[in-house]
Image: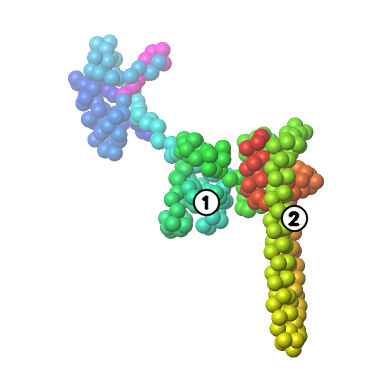
Amino acid sequence: MKIKVVHNNEIHLLKLQNPTLQGIREHIQKIYPNIDSNFTLAYNDSENDQITLSCQEDLQVLVDEGIQTIKIFVVISQIPKPVPQEKMVHKHHTCDGCQIHPIVGSRFKCLECQDYDLCEECQLKNLHNHHKFYKISTEQELEQFRKEHQGKFGHWGFRPHGQGHHGHGPHGHGPHGHGFHGHEAFKQFRELFQDPAFKDVKQTFCSIAKDVFSAVKTEIEKHKSSQQQQQQEKPQEECNLDEKLETQQEKQQETQQENTNQQTDCKVQEEIEQKIKNLIQILQCDEKIAREYVECFKDLSLDGIVEIILDKQ
């Protein structure tokens, strides 16, 4: 029997008196020494169907039919290559070590700080080593973290980031990484700020702040009154000299305080304006609404404002 062996667009001819399947396989392995040993043999019958030669009995059928020439194809098993598992992308998080955004791969969440995360590289540098971290590299680990630390870090267990820090934040359509567009989304935010619970919180903060400032003012007045009494007990000359020195010091302090206050006010105002711009980009809302959000939660960071809004939604 003449056998045409076909492999990689090559045809080799061999002639065997008493062909065996094992003999054919050994001959093929001599021709192609690097071939995978798990290959199979097949041929096309008269109806052009591909028949696999899996044992000697299959080949014996051809011998018994008296077929003189047969074309046998070498079929290599196509073992699927393992698909590499994609690393988790923490699109709402920025590394507090190298400031990379978003964190790709494992994210290490500080269990003590409210808002501190590290990427894999910065964690290996032993940064922030005085606190313990929680490793989050899969969705399952993220869910487990939320269950274990829901009371401490909130329902979501993460801090949202937009364009205000690093990256681009949510934009587009839908609630999953695509921003918030349309009348319905703005309606929900308005309802959030009309919630009596939020109004009560705001009033409570304002009331506490007033009490604190009032107490500080009272202590300052008492201190000044005490100093005045002490000055009256001194001789007149010493009192006048002390008054002059104190006046000069007060003027210097007032000047320094004014400069400091001006710088602080400018810096605070710049931060507020930047926060409003970032909030507009993240929530895709107009400037008026963004200012209301910032005014309502002016003691919170941008991350905290967005986290409260997402949590409420």
Q: Is residue 65 left or right of residue 191?
A: left
- Residue type, mark 1 in image: Cys
List x then y, in percent, for residue 28.
27, 31
Q: Is residue 33 above or below residue 297?
A: above
Decide which of tag 2 and tag 1 comes sooner along the chain: 1
Q: Residue furthest front?
A: 233
In the image, residue 271 sits, relative to residue 111, either above or below, namely: below
**Which one is nearer the viewer's eye here, 56 or 70?**
56
| Render colour scheme | rainbow
Asked whether 66 falls inside the magenta stretch, the response is no
Q: State the CA–CA distance, disc 2 to disc 1.
A: 26 Å
170, 190: nearer the viewer: 190
Q: Which mark is residue 273?
A: 2
Residue 291, numbered label = none
Mark 1 element type: loop
| Placement of the N terminus among the 4 image quadrants | top left
Q: Residue at x 53, y 57 (%)?
A: 98
Pointer 2: residues within 10 angstroms few (<14), some, or many (20+)? some
Residue type at numbered disc 2: Glu
Q: Which mark is residue 113?
A: 1
Q: Which residues are magenta?
A: 41-48
Q: Position of residue 162 (x, y in %)?
A: 64, 48
Magenta stretch holds residue 45: yes
Tag 2, which secondary structure? helix
Asked if residue 150 can be seen in this view, the reply is: yes
Q: Residue at x 61, y 53 (%)?
A: 166
Is 245 in front, or is 110? Answer: 245
